[in-house]
Structure formats: structure tokens, C-alpha cells
Image (cartoon, rainbow, N blue to C red):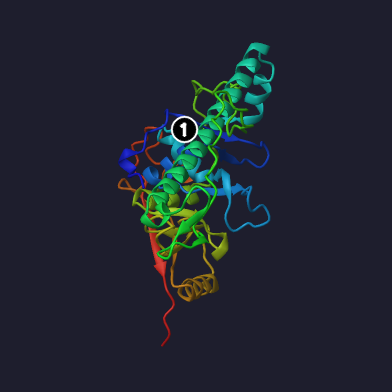
């Protein structure tokens, strides 16, 4: 496995594709980018695509990867990514000149030819290894006694059929210098669609203030956060990669002065304890050092994101159920 320090960084900032205007969803299609984000920036997302070999199951899924709105906002704020309208860039690209389409077809043909040559090379290599194994076997003393007629002589001089007689393996045909190209399906649209470039004005995805503040706070502490719908919360909080660790907290955000029903607290604590996790609730603290309330911070949960002098402070509380 390649260490995270050895992973090549992508060209930054990279595009995140928004595929809907009404219900905004953000997708990534590059597996190398997905791996880099997971190992380097603790970004998980959720896979949506079915696997070609097992299309009727939904336990193991593949590309594309859908990012949470909070993950997209964090990446854009840190200057790692920018959001593009997937429909608009493909609409404009389809009006490109025919030369770009011809270039695209030439690249697909080139990739298919390279794949076909690699497969042919592996086939010839396997044939050569099989021939070498047969040659080693024929050089053993028992096989050396086999005559060209398929018989061997025993000590009394009688001729009996050899159990080790086998026809001489046929020579494999030489691989074609120009094999038939494979039909390759590209995983990206570049080319013929030109890669999008970041705009001069950065557009930040709209997020819920307390929810994003809690996400950003826990992410800054090194946690991995995935959607928590399975456990009836906003985020499942992992101390490390979910492939290696179970989640430790079920996180829910709330306003600082929001009234929380006592039954919700008891139910959340019992739920968390029942699945061996802590029920965590957190939000933006209203009071700052100056004693004043910063309404702009409470609205979007950005803190210092746009040069504000007010330090964002998030308070979290963990509740567990304990029997008497």
C-alpha cells in the first residue's frame, strides 16, 4: 500500500461537479483524487455507482463519490477545490469543433491498442513459461528413457507403453504486431471536454451554520465524519479511517440557545450506549471574549473563513446512558 506521503497530489484546485440545481449534489469521478482526499484530508463521502461484476447488490459500491455539503464547503474554503455546474460545462463542450472529437476518438483508440498489446504480451509470457516447464520436465531421468516412438525399454528388454508419453507441445503462434484494439470506456470526459478552470469569484456552497461548525470543529481534531442516517444522527464520528475503526460518537448539532427535549437527550444517550458509542451534541457558543454575539458567525459557521477577527468557538457535550 502506498503511504500517504507518497501519493501524488492532484492539480489544485480541482473541480467538484454539481449535478443538480434544486437538490444540490456534489460528485467526484477520479479514483486517484478520491484516494488522495481520504488519506490526506480525512474526506470520506459516499460511493453511489454499482459494480459492473455485481450490479444487483448495494453493499459494495463504486464511483462516482458523492460528497457531503459540509465536506465541499470545507474543501472550497481551504482552496483545494471549486464547484462547477456539470450540465453547463458538458453543454458548452458538445458545441466544440469536430477536430476535438477526432482527437478524443484517437485517444480512445490509442488506449485500446495499448491495452490489447499488454494483454498479448502477458499471453506470450505465459506460453513461454509453460514451454519452459515442459522442457524442464523432459530433462528428468525418467522422461529421458522415453523413445521417439512413445515407448521405453525396461531391464528385461520388453517394450511397454510409457505412462509419461505426451505429445510435443505446439509452438505458440507469434503475437500480432498490431492486435485488434480493445474497446475502452473512459472514466472521465477529458478530452473532448476541456477541464474546467476556477472562476475569479469563489462560490461557497450553502450550509447549515451549526451543522457546518460542528463538522469543521471535529474535522480539525483529526476525526473522520460520515453521514449518520443509519444511527439517526447527522454525523458518525470515527477516530480514524472507517475501514480500520468503529465510530466513537453519534454527532448532532444545535443552536446555542435551542431548547432540547429531555426525552431526546435520554433517547440519544440510550441509543449511543446501545451501539457502544457516545451521543454527542454541539454548537457554536454565542459569547466571545468581548461578550458580544457575532450574528454573521452564527449564520454560516465560518469563523475566520473570510477574514473575521472573531474566533469561532464550538462547544460539544457527550452523553451516555448509565444504569443504576
Residue at image point 37% right, 46% down: 312
- Left or right of 63? Residue 255 is left
- Pick the quarter of the image with the C terminus: bottom left
The residue depicted at 60 percent of the width and 24 percent of the height is 109
Toward the viewer: 175 or 151?
151
Q: Is residue 302 visible?
A: no
Depicted 67 relative to depicted 153: above or below: above
Residue lying farthest to the front in this orientation: 157
Which secondary structure, mark 1? strand
Q: Residue at x 40, y 62 (%)?
A: 245
Residue 219 placement (x, y as % from top left): 39, 50
Q: Position of residue 258 (x, y in %)?
A: 51, 59
Q: Is residue 260 left or right of residue 219?
A: right
Residue 167, visible in the rendered structure: yes
Q: What percent of the width, then of the height, locates residue 200?
A: 49, 20
Q: Residues within 10 Å of mark 1 (few under 14, many from 20)?
A: many
Work out which residue is located at the far bottom of the displayed protein and give it: 324
Question: Who is closer to the viewer here, 106 or 236?
Answer: 106
Where does the image place residue 186, in percent across and percent down from the top left?
59, 32
Q: Nearer the viewer, residue 119 or 60?
A: 119
Q: Quadrant of residue 88?
A: top right
Residue hosting label 1: 81
* Image height of 28 relative to 319, above or below: above
Amino acid at each position: 500500500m502506498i503511504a500517504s506521503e507518497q501519493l501524488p497530489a492532484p492539480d489544485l484546485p480541482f473541480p467538484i461537479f454539481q449535478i443538480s440545481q434544486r437538490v444540490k449534489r456534489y460528485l467526484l469521478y477520479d479514483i486517484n483524487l478520491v484516494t488522495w482526499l481520504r488519506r490526506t484530508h480525512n474526506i470520506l463521502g459516499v460511493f453511489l455507482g454499482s459494480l459492473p461484476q455485481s450490479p444487483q447488490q448495494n453493499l459494495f459500491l463504486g464511483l462516482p463519490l458523492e460528497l457531503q455539503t459540509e465536506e465541499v464547503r470545507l474543501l472550497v474554503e481551504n482552496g483545494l477545490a471549486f464547484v462547477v455546474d456539470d450540465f453547463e460545462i458538458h453543454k458548452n463542450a458538445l458545441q466544440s469543433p469536430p477536430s476535438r472529437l477526432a482527437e478524443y476518438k484517437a485517444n480512445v483508440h490509442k488506449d485500446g491498442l495499448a491495452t490489447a498489446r499488454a494483454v498479448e504480451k502477458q499471453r506470450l509470457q505465459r506460453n513461454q513459461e509453460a514451454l519452459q516447464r515442459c522442457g524442464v520436465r523432459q530433462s528428468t531421468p525418467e522422461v529421458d528413457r522415453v523413445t521417439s516412438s512413445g515407448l521405453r525399454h525396461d531391464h528385461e528388454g520388453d517394450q511397454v507403453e510409457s505412462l509419461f508419453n505426451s505429445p510435443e507441445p505446439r509452438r505458440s503462434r507469434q503475437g500480432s504486431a498490431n492486435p485488434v484494439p480493445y474497446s475502452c470506456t473512459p472514466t472521465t470526459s477529458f478530452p473532448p471536454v476541456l477541464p474546467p478552470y476556477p472562476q475569479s469569484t469563489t462560490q461557497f456552497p450553502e450550509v447549515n451554520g451549526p451543522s457546518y461548525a460542528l463538522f469543521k470543529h471535529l474535522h480539525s481534531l483529526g476525526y473522520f465524519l460520515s453521514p449518520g442516517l443509519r444511527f439517526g444522527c447527522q454525523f458518525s464520528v470515527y477516530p480514524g479511517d472507517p475501514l480500520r475503526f468503529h465510530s466513537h460518537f453519534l454527532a448532532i448539532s444545535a443552536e446555542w440557545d435551542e431548547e432540547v427535549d429531555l426525552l431526546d437527550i435520554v433517547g440519544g444517550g440510550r441509543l449511543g450506549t446501545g451501539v457502544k458509542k457516545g451521543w454527542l451534541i454541539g454548537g457554536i457558543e454565542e459569547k466571545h471574549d468581548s461578550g458580544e454575539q457575532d450574528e454573521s458567525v452564527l449564520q454560516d459557521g465560518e469563523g475566520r473563513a473570510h477574514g473575521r477577527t472573531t474566533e469561532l468557538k464550538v462547544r460539544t457535550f457527550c452523553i451516555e446512558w448509565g444504569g443504576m
